[in-house]
Amino acid sequence: MRRFLFALLGACLLGAGVMVGWRWVGARPTPGPATANPIAGIPAAAVVSPSLVTDNPQLRDRGFFERLDHPSTGEGLYPTPPFALLAGQHNWLRRPPPTLGQHNSEVLAELCGLSDADLDRLAADAVIGTRPKGL
């Protein structure tokens, strides 16, 4: 699949020099091209799966992640804003992200004025819920 994507991308690009460059990148394991290209004056970086970004030693050492306990997924690392904490502040994150539909009642009833019957109807019609559709 990787070679197919490189071939497809290469077919869209014009010029033999560009094609040679893409063949060079496609033939190397990650992060080879990302570390070699700056030397050649070509900006590049490895694409990393979001599930693996917490393994990045630079981000960990800079305190980019904070540990939180989530009610559905348990303890995990969550990204923080990419700038320094304010004076006297110890953490960016105060609570884990909400679960799907966690605040439906609070928002729709208390803030929007919907009744319990309205919420029941919306849930029955799959307009609101606590699980993604199809799961």
Image: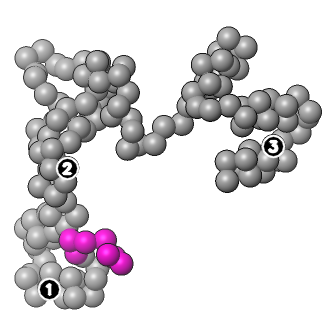
Which of disc 1 and disc 2 is earlier in sequence? Answer: 2
Reply yes or no: does residue 121 show up in magenta.
no
> Under tag 1, what secondary structure?
helix
Amino acid type of disc 3?
Gly
Reply yes or no: does residue 133 show up in magenta.
yes
Viewer-nearest of labels 3 and 1? 3
- Give the residue at mark 1: 120
Residue 10 bears which disc, if any?
3
Q: Main secondary structure of the magenta part?
A: loop
Amino acid type of disc 2?
Pro
Q: Please say if the residues under marks 3 and 1 sit with CB atoms less than 8 Å apart.
A: no
Amino acid type of disc 1?
Asp
Could you say which is closer to the camera, residue 119 or residue 115? 119
Which of disc 1 and disc 3 is earlier in sequence? Answer: 3
Q: Where is residue 10 in the image (x, y as percent from the top left)?
A: 81, 43
Taking the image as drawn, is residue 23 in sight? yes
Residue drawn at 35 percent across, 22 percent down? 57
Could you say which is closer to the camera, residue 90 or residue 116? 90
Could you say which is closer to the camera, residue 33 or residue 124? 33
Quarter residue 59 falls in: top left
Residue 97 bears which disc, if any?
2
Q: In which quarter of the image is the C terminus?
A: bottom left
Taking the image as drawn, is residue 112 in sight? no
> Under tag 2, what secondary structure?
loop
